[in-house]
Amino acid sequence: MIICMSEIGVRRRPGGRSARVRQSVLDATLAVLAEDGVDALTVAAVAARAGVHETSIRRRWRTRANLICDALLSCSAQQLPIPDTGSLREDLTAFATEAAAYDATPLGRALLHATVMPTADDALAKAREDFWRRRREPAKVMIWRAVARGEIPATTATQLVLEAIVAPLHFRTLVTHDRLDERLPREIVDLVLNGILEPQP
Amino acid sequence: MIICMSEIGVRRRPGGRSARVRQSVLDATLAVLAEDGVDALTVAAVAARAGVHETSIRRRWRTRANLICDALLSCSAQQLPIPDTGSLREDLTAFATEAAAYDATPLGRALLHATVMPTADDALAKAREDFWRRRREPAKVMIWRAVARGEIPATTATQLVLEAIVAPLHFRTLVTHDRLDERLPREIVDLVLNGILEPQP
Amino acid sequence: MIICMSEIGVRRRPGGRSARVRQSVLDATLAVLAEDGVDALTVAAVAARAGVHETSIRRRWRTRANLICDALLSCSAQQLPIPDTGSLREDLTAFATEAAAYDATPLGRALLHATVMPTADDALAKAREDFWRRRREPAKVMIWRAVARGEIPATTATQLVLEAIVAPLHFRTLVTHDRLDERLPREIVDLVLNGILEPQP
Amino acid sequence: MIICMSEIGVRRRPGGRSARVRQSVLDATLAVLAEDGVDALTVAAVAARAGVHETSIRRRWRTRANLICDALLSCSAQQLPIPDTGSLREDLTAFATEAAAYDATPLGRALLHATVMPTADDALAKAREDFWRRRREPAKVMIWRAVARGEIPATTATQLVLEAIVAPLHFRTLVTHDRLDERLPREIVDLVLNGILEPQP
DNA sequence: GGATAAGCGAGACGGTACGTCTCGTCTTTTG
DNA sequence: CAAAAGACGAGACGTACCGTCTCGCTTATCC
């Protein structure tokens, strides 16, 4: 599978029924994903919801995985807003709060599940990595600004810091449904900024 | 589904064929899980591997989900060893290293995938939470020891600290297949212990 | 299967629990047969109804077919009453009416169905033939009496006459659910007694 | 099940794969019916014999009963030949002889069994009635011709006469496996034509 | 602006897995 | 130690989905 997913059916016949069908199918996919979850997402359900014949979907996306993957990418563009408060702590806290809130929405949860499914499909795997990369990269600017402000050293591992903040949130959403309240983001950010060691005198 | 999974078939006829069948099926389930992954785990495959008739599995576990769930719980006992080096940093680093190594094994990865699968089944959801709780609780002793040694304040959020350490590892294993090398655990532990802020003069 | 069905469990302990169990199972079998029909008759259902463990039934009757067959024979004794009005026409009409009425009862219909089921089991086949023989033989006396009265020739084929009368009734019950009303028996008897040819002058 | 069985898949694409599959499945059904009997008829067996995937059969006919029923109807067209000898006695004798011969064939016996199976399925019940109606109706012409020739009164109950002739044959085939030889048809016809009463002087 | 090629509607089919229901055998457990 | 209770082997049934294929027909694009 060498096709680039997010391009399927995009080029040819850009204006007209094709494009209309494509869009309504992707919308329907996300809608079903949000409502019923990823394992209840069936091609037939998407077709019905999109008002499109099942065959048309199968013809274009070939497999269920491709469909999900394309839908994923199609919405990975709409990124979370990156706060800019002038303080790293406030930036990260706001960011973490947004992430937690998104994980609490049906679509957010469904996307999370979708990107975590085991898969043998390389294209899908790649699409998932892209999905997260597109989410992560813009957020790095918060770190860079803090470095520029001298809050943190220039050697700070940007990606790792971001992951240390969002991974626990996603993890709680996925498995342990422990407390995922409004105080949690700040606690995590405090942890990452200050560490837990007793301040050395 | 009110039955407690991990008890299925345990009580009655504890000595004999029943117990033998149960054990071989659970073993086979984990084996298949490790080799082929969770979505390739088919009841027929487990039955074949266990040398047991498919019907016997379906009769006792009813659904595929129950089977996976029971297998999960059956192996959640065998916990990771909890290091005790006298230093929190070394303890956590060793622990994180073990966790990363386990995530790199087929079974580890499969268990991870199995516990993040979306599910409508309450029993399964509960089993997964139990699975992680049984993994997490014993690890808390590392924190307690550090508190006793005066390394960290008694108010430290034990669960959160552990999650901040393992969640990024699991997250990389699940989605972004970014670097998951031998240096990563130490980096995360440093992050959690020291924070990233410039030391205040 | 060489065992003679209708003897199973009869000899030993004629007054004890065995006999009690046997009777309640056979009763339950007939009851289920009457209520749900032969193809819905399941060993489990009979066991439940008889208040007996399924295994006990299986041990004694071995197969479902044997059970049905034994139940059948156990009730083939209770024959239809043979009328004796002094007139062959009235005797046969009454007999046919009874037969039609019995076919209209749930048990009658179920027995009919049970005896026409295809089977590979010789014992069952034989039991079914016995069932019908026991029903038919006593009825022949009607013919004999008519011969004695000089109503019909001594050469009359007794069995064939009886079959010509009851077979159409059973046939309508089994397949064509055409008219099976109170006038039918008499019409059939008229047919058999007088024939349909125009009386020769 | 509101669908009319015998129409399933008949209309659309009359010459394509569908029709080919349909035909081979029905043929296979009748073949299996003839060879192994109705209760040994398994969907898998039919599928194997028809060189068609089991799922295709289940999809179109849904249940085993429907399949049998459709096969039944599909062959109810090929009726027995209706003799026309100029004599009612000879016509009926020939007809009865044919019927007896057909009951002696595997397919004949299987069809007979199939049509007397108890069923909760209305469509199947109706199909069976249709099957027999289609067999019976054309035969009535023998009676009508005899009426026209003045052999029998115009008031003769055509259906009843035919049933009186074939029912005993079918009955013997189904249950009592008594004599079903070449003399029987004639004896039955004699019975029905002349009656058994001593001729009145 | 009409020919042409792409895409869509419709419906089967092959294939895999799931879960249910029997029947009949076998093995533990228990009285 | 024999009967009762229950698990197991075997196999059919029916359901749901996935992915492929073939026809017609509609519609967008291009000459």
Image (cartoon, coloured by chain):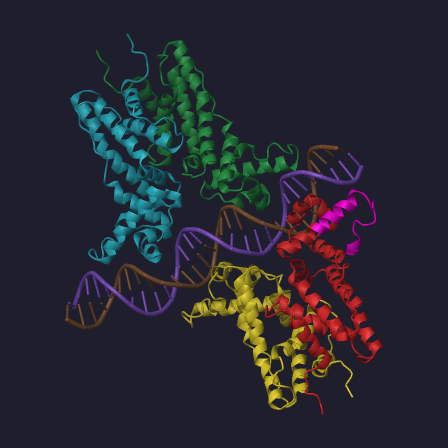
Chain colours: A cyan, B green, C red, D yellow, E brown, F purple
Q: C11 left or right of B54?
A: right
Say which of C93 and C49 sits in front: C93
Judge whether residue D104 can be spotted in this image: no
Name which quarter of the figure residue C55 lies in. Answer: top right
Query: Residue B89, relative to residue C72: is it above or below?
Result: above
Judge whether residue A115 can be spotted in this image: yes
Say which of A22 and A181 sits in front: A181
Instruction: Kindly give the residue lying farthest to the front in the view shown.
Output: C85
The quarter of the rendered structure image containing the C terminus of chain A is: top left
Residue C8 highlighted magenta (yes or no): yes
Percent x, y of residue A83:
20, 29
Name which quarter of the figure residue D154 lies in. Answer: bottom right
Instruction: Kindly give the residue lying farthest to the top in the view shown.
Output: A201
Instruction: Kindly give the residue lying farthest to the bottom in the view shown.
Output: C201
Residue B72 highlighted magenta (yes or no): no
Q: How many marks?
A: 0
Say which of A52 and C27 sits in front: C27
Query: Residue D112, relative to residue A97: is it above or below?
Result: below
Percent x, y of residue C104:
64, 63
Percent x, y of residue A168:
34, 28
Percent x, y of residue C128:
73, 62
Q: B161 left or right of E7?
A: right
Name which quarter of the figure residue B147 lies in. Answer: top left
Residue under the point 70% across and 78% down: C190
The range drawn in magenta is C1-27
Instruction: Kindly give the residue lying farthest to the right in the view shown.
Output: C148
